[in-house]
Amino acid sequence: MSFQPVLLWSDALLFILIATIIALALWARRQEPLRAAWGRVLKDGVAMAAATVLAVFVLIGLLDSLHFRERLPDQPGVPARYAVDVSSVLDALLSDLRARSEKTYSAPLATHLYSKEALADSAQREFPRLKHGGAHLGQDLSSHEFDIALRVSRGCAGGLVIWLLLVSVWCKVRGLEFIEMLKVGADGTAMRPVILTMLPILLLFGVAMSLGGSYHVFGTDKVGLDVLYLSFKAIRTSLLIGTLATLIMLPAAILLGILAGYVGGWVDDLIQYLYTTLSSIPGVLLIAAGVLMMQVIIDTHPDWFATTAERADARFLALCAILGVTGWTGLARLLRGETLKLRELEYVQAAQAFGVGRFAIMLRHILPNLMHIVVIAVVMDFTGLVLAEAVLSAIGIGVDPNTVSFGSMINTARWELARDPIVWWSLVAAFFIMFALVLAANLFADAVRDAFDPRSSA
Amino acid sequence: MLAYIIRRLLYAIPILIGVNLLTFALFFVVNTPDDMARMQLGVKRVTPEAIQKWKAERGYDKPLVWNAAAAGGAKLTDTILFAKSVRMFVGDFGRADDGRDIAREITTRMGPSLAIAVPTFVLGLFVAISFALLLVFFRATTLDFAGVVLCVAMMSISGLFYIIGGQWLVSKVWHLAPISGYSGGLDAAKFLVLPVLVNVVSGIGSSTRWYRTIFLEEITRDYVRTARAKGLPERVVLFRHVLRNAMIPILTGVVVVIPSLFMGSLLIESFFGIPGLGSYTIDAINAQDFAVVRSMVFIGSVLYIVGLLATDISYTIADPRVRLK
């Protein structure tokens, strides 16, 4: 075996999360109201287009969550050793981008470095040629623009061909004519928005791949790393922050919310006291206090972590946990209120009269009827958490400096705005990718809320 | 109503005790003062004497909750819990790591924080409610749809980009206002324009959408139909009837944040170099000045509780039917 798989804690949690979602989806298929609600989401064009974009992000995030350590070259008489740094499948796929680092900043698609340097063979300070950006052009740069145009059109063509292939396969499966597929309402399902969204995505990927082969599409950062590669890496951080923080808080919020609402009495008082106290501390400050304390723990116990990746991962998970602790109070309060209402309904009282146990009632009769609130809360929280990560990292209480995230990208890039000419590309790349992610999540969350909220369908 | 206010204030006491115990646990039990000293002095090669000195300087060299060595009442009072946490109730926050009195620092830094927060709050509220009323006036038209799309798009942009974009466009390209900084007196105005503007713009998306939903819920009510039936123009219906009846949900979201305006905005103040409470907190976080962070947590929760009480009182003013008992 030429590599050793590494399972970071955040990877494990992510896989648990995905398994839970699949299990819940299978369960929801048998529940009439949940199936109806998801059916409404499936028929919503905007929601499906947003879901397609999200799916692409999730795929990238998943590829970046399969971690391994590469095996070092064998030496006779020494047992197999593995590299210290942990890479992911995404790193392996983008090894080209990762390896081709320059000396320092260079603009997108540039052939020369951003700053002048004294060269060996001339007396003046010149812009040195990039090692990798446009290296195939050699010394003759007259065909630079033409080369870019050629590669863009080649990438577009590639993307288009893949898209056509995918659509034809789908047509074959559904037994439809190609052109019918693109008409409104041709198919009962909402494949049309999915197919139409796939086209720009594939075109963009085609162009990025074709240009990324010999240029730095988004330029390079201060230490010469390809910004496109960093943006891909930041996606996993965003996705994990958005989902794991909710996953961590969900069991506590559901359990305490239902207990407070159903059992009442001193249990209710205690739980209410608990969440009122927690929510009365301003969120940012509680997070700051938590992160400070976590930093002390991590710094005073360096022996707990074998690799820097594990250490960064521990800090990352602690951040998720702290965000979760500050976030569960709102959901618990909502669930408590809804449980108070449900408790008085006839079917719950009938179950009580039949002598069904308290916990059985909470599990079988209350919990399923709260699921819509939970689903809405999970999808609505996602964007807030993604945006919060950027802000927290910018004020120094976010992810580990070794973890690539949009927050840390923005934070390092903002100090470069004072330069002249300004270094704008890291910011612009982070802006567009984050905007796409958050916008898609917002649109999807709205559709889910409309579909699940009983008030909106009435 | 007075009885209600007094009772609510009494309820606040156990919550503040809870906050206090929580921060105490977070700052002194999860990590012992020894850990903090080791972290601040550098993990490796630190002598026990240096740790002792660090602790003594900050008054962390006492037992946590029970001082068996002391006599009588001092068994309880000569401890970290009493000296560092309980004394916060009487406004004694102790000293920061740089030796300055935290309470005095807070009073001087309150001014700049309020100078940013109050205009932002008033302007933001006014702009968001006006836009929301405009969208509701043109509801179910293309303008409404475009407005909502714009709101969702604006919500999807991280606040950081508003700040960076604002600094770049207004200060660097147009040279209309300084990029950051602050000065006292009337000069402050030119430093305040940009942060206030950025803050208002970054909040427009989500708040406009929120108020629009509230207004749309009101507009389906019977009294609105009655008002239209008696021939009132739509403008009057919106301003005189819908806006006033939507006050309760609006107040719920708005009044609670008013006391917290003192705390300032961490992000805006640190990016624009405003010497307010927000940047004080940020600086303390980065310098790992635990005493300051602890004090800000305590003050923040006091202000939040005051905000909740103010919300209840504001209901009685907005809606005479509400009686607080």
Image: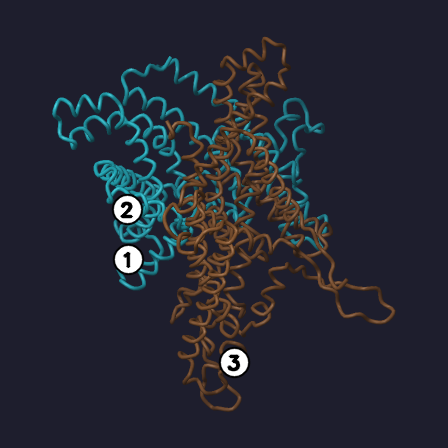
Chain colours: A brown, B cyan
Which label number is shown at residue B274?
none
Circle 1 crowding by C-alpha within 10 Å: few under 14, some 14–19, many from 20: some
Instruction: Work out whether residue B181 can be spotted.
Output: yes
The subunit carrying tag 3 is A
Label 2: which secondary element: helix
Q: Which residue is mark 3?
A: A135
Of mark 1 and mark 2, the one earlier in the sequence is 2
Q: CA distance from mark 1 to mark 2?
A: 31 Å
In the rendered image, residues at marks 1 and 3 fall on the same chain? no
Whether residue A264 is situated above or below residue A96 in the rendered picture: above
The subunit carrying tag 2 is B
Front one among A403 and B30 = A403
Position in image of residue A199 (x %, y %) = 43, 58
Residue at 59% x, 11% y is A352
Left or right position of A202 against B151:
right
Callouts 1 and 3 close, C-beta under 8 Å: no
Amino acid on which disc 1 is placed: Ala
Instruction: Work out whether residue B278 can be spotted.
Output: no
Amino acid on which disc 2 is placed: Ala
Q: Which residue is mark 2?
A: B146
Whether residue B190 is situated above or below residue A286 in the rendered picture: below
In the rendered image, residues at marks 1 and 2 fall on the same chain? yes
- Mark 1 or mark 3: which is in front? 3
Q: Which residue is mark 1?
A: B177
Left or right position of A37 against A64:
left
| Quadrant location, the N terminus of chain B | top left
Position in image of residue A82 (x %, y %) = 75, 63
Q: CA distance from mark 3 to mark 2?
A: 46 Å
The subunit carrying tag 1 is B
Q: CA distance from mark 1 to mark 3?
A: 43 Å
Callouts 3 and 2 close, C-beta under 8 Å: no
Position in image of residue A220 (x %, y %) = 49, 69
